[in-house]
Image (cartoon, rainbow, N blue to C red):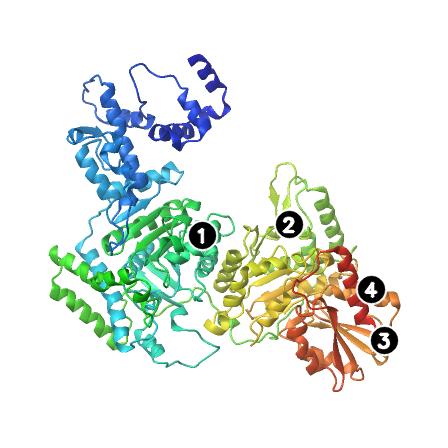
Amino acid sequence: MHEGVMKAWLESSHLYGGNVAYVEELYEAYLDDATSVPEEWREVFDQLPKVDGVDVDVKHSQVREQFAELAKNKHREVVVAADSTSDAKQVRVLQLINAFRFRGHQNANLDPLGLWKRERVRDLELDYHELTDADLDKEYNVGSFACGKETMKLKDLYAALKNTYCGSIGAEYMHITSTEEKRWLQQRLESTFSKPQFSKEAKLRILKGLTAADGLEKYLSAKFPGAKRFSLEGGDALVPMLKELIHRAGESGQQEAVIGMAHRGRLNVLVNVLGKNPQVLFDEFAGKYGELAGSGDVKYHMGYSSDFATQGGDVHMALAFNPSHLEIVNPVVMGSVRARLDRLGCKTGSKALPITIHGDSAIAGQGVVQETFNLSQTRAFGVGGTIRIVVNNQVGFTTSKQEDVRSTDYCTDIAKMVQAPIFHVNSDDPEAVAFVTQVALDFRNQFRRDVVIDLVCYRRHGHNEADEPNATQPLMYQKIKKHPVPRQLYADQLALEGIISADEAKALADEYRNGLDNGKCVVEEIKPDTKHSSDWSKFVGHDWDVAYDPKLSVDKLKELAEKVSTYPDTHKAQSRVKKIYDDRKAMAKGEKQLDWGMAETLAYATLVDEGVDVRMTGQDSGRGTFFHRHAVVHNQQDASTYIPLQDIHEKQGTFEVYDSVLSEEAVLAFEYGYATAEPTSLVLWEAQFGDFANGAQVVFDQFLSSGEQKWGRLCGLTMLLPHGYEGQGPEHSSARLERYLQLCADHNMQVCVPSTPAQVYAMLRRQSVRPLRRPLIVMTPKSLLRHPLAVSSIEELAEGVFHNMIDEIDDIDPANVKRVVFCSGKVYYELLQERRKQELDDVAIVRVEQLYPFPHQEMDEIMARYQHVKDFVWCQEEPQNQGAWYCSQHHFWDAIPAGANLTYAGRKASAAPACGYMSTHTKEQNALVADALTIKK
């Protein structure tokens, strides 16, 4: 039998030498727990030859460690024969160590209120591993337990394991597959037994942070009783924790840090970490504001930025503006950090740090959290790891029963999907909090991965200060009422250690209160003159029609067209792609008119040629959902890629195009964050179909449409939403144009429907060249991408002007016109073709290429030719209750001559955007075109 097993072993390709490390790791896991490895591997290991007299195999890693120790100790060793019983005990000791690494967190002292009911964990008990009191004084090899010793008495080892894994810190990391990362974490935790020694200065710094957190809440409670502030009380450790994080970040070379958090504790972080002037906050509570611009927002949504001095240099901190929609700010923060990293030329994440602060119910409950974790290690959205802190106050508004708020043991279990280490920590042990903060940042900097800190705390008041929590959490709040505040607990601890007296601790509190009374910054690390990361001044104070120079020479366009239509001879493109590039070469030479894909590509080429950085993400954006873009050419021989737009010239701007993860909400939020941090780049997000963009509706509603009004945040993000009715059903026809038009006011964003290649070229260039940064929503076409009439000459592109409206193009005498049809997008070409087919000369077709801000001046100029007309029609493909009709008709009523009539031609009102049957679609489409062109007698 042995020969057969060994033969099978040698014949197994997966057991070749290149995989030895992987196989050894599986085998060691098998020795710990045979059920922990896949069944097929268990069968292989079960059949391995047994050595007579040895019941349990010894791990190879232990053997290697023993040989390494022998190499260090040159003195003569005495070899003693071991019996099988002692070997078995040794293995059980190593299993005990592993048990604590896997499950010690389940017995950790994490809840400051002591309310958690933890089940007994038998794996952590000696008798479970068949170890007895008789073994306590025996010396055992501790394997890889990183305590600095080769052997320990069992009782000492058991105490060390409890201190390391069952104290105020519960570490979860054994779900990580990387042995290197696990060994690193074991070294940091086990070498100190998770109880590092802090200097007197470090302890006083922690106490000052707790004093500040507690002092501000008490001050606001006394000065503004009953006012909503979403107090941090109970989670006070967050303040010294964040300051420790920024200090260590600065010392490790970070230049910027961006923080995202919800309302809980936000005011405290603003004042006690970012250094917001407390008098400004008090004025906001009192209803005193400076000169108002826009709608403004409540004080616990506002952002802030400042420079924080550390021993390693200043760190520019920014607290992201945040709506009440929980967790959506997280991808915004990541996008902002990615923009800063790109600006600094940093590919590793070593120069900017994202920090996101979550609630326990929200991190488990909001789907955007999963989407954001999924972004973390991707090419397009990676930021070198995020520090994620959960302010776990054990209740979500009024809901605290675990069976009501989540289906997992911990609120942080979602982080295991990206193999992030998770540190649960008792917030009443601020030194443990400081320690895991250091470990978390160092791990992030070492391995460029996300890390989660679960700050287990409590909420001293209700959801807000006017709420009554005893109605729903009576037992919890009976405990909280009697529980000392964290500052007092730590001050008492330091008094016992002889570091500070009770009077000195009180003096710190009095000193802090005096600082609040003076209304000056209370954070000593804050630099007085904060510099912004980017210069936005040239984009402020302009309206959408601000003048700019749009023109480029035809020769320049031809030169760029040649470059973007060329790829290396050694690069074998797929046959259809080759045909597209051959056509583009003909377009570059003036032999063919330009189609949509070529005009769009030329817009990007002109920008990067001028030094502008262009970034595009979206599902399938490299190729384009509809096979029109092909910004990335894939070599059919070796799968290598070539991007012509990256090869314009040496000093060009960057061009980055990424096929994104299959997500709308997190990706669009990320790109919003990127665009708000980088005003000089053209940033684009493309939906696979415009219909799917509503998966990110919260981003449109809370950020893109209202961010400038609420927070003064400018954003030049461009969104490309494929739109058009081609009989593909209710999920592949409408980009929900009406949703965006409904959000339009105060010139907050632009909604465009370009109908020619020259128009899309001019629109994209305008978005970048013009000194205005407002979101641009574009209804992009599908069938028009290859429509024979939807072409433009290179001379039209060279003109560079985006026409907000386009008057009749055929040779029709305005004096003979009896009806004017207004429309946007693809339906124009169907109207045009049908009118030409019928040879109608009394119907003019006017295209509205920008629906918002509505181009009143251009409309008036066009209407001057049709003052005699009494019959005006708006034609659209969408049902009457959708599309532009309801949101835009008032603009047409204002423009048409007095006494004229405006009617609707399109599909009747419908709950669904489109029908699902091609025959019905065709019938409806023909009817709306006929209705628009037929003059009623």
Examine the rendering and report whether any part of residue 932 can be seen: yes
Q: CA distance from mark 1 to mark 3?
A: 60 Å
Q: Which residue is mark 2?
A: 623
Which three-letter amino acid code belongs to the residue tagged 3? Answer: Asp
Q: Earlier in the sequence, mark 4 or mark 1?
A: 1
Q: Earlier in the sequence, mark 1 or mark 3?
A: 1
Q: Earlier in the sequence, mark 4 or mark 2?
A: 2
Q: CA distance from mark 4 to mark 1?
A: 51 Å
Mark nearer the viewer, 1 or 3: 3
Q: Which residue is mark 3?
A: 842
Give the x, y percent position of residue 698.
51, 63
SS for tag 2? loop
Mark nearer the viewer, 3 or 2: 3
Given contact means CB atoms under 8 Å apart, are the residues at marks 4 and 2 in contact?
no
Which three-letter amino acid code belongs to the residue tagged 4? Answer: Gln
Left or right of 852: which side holds 505? left
Label 4 environment density (alpha carbons within 10 Å; few <14, some 14–19, many ≥20)? few
Number of the label disc, if any, that sits on residue 552: none
Q: CA distance from mark 2 to mark 1?
A: 25 Å
Q: Which residue is mark 4?
A: 833
**As displayed, is residue 599 above or below residue 507?**
above
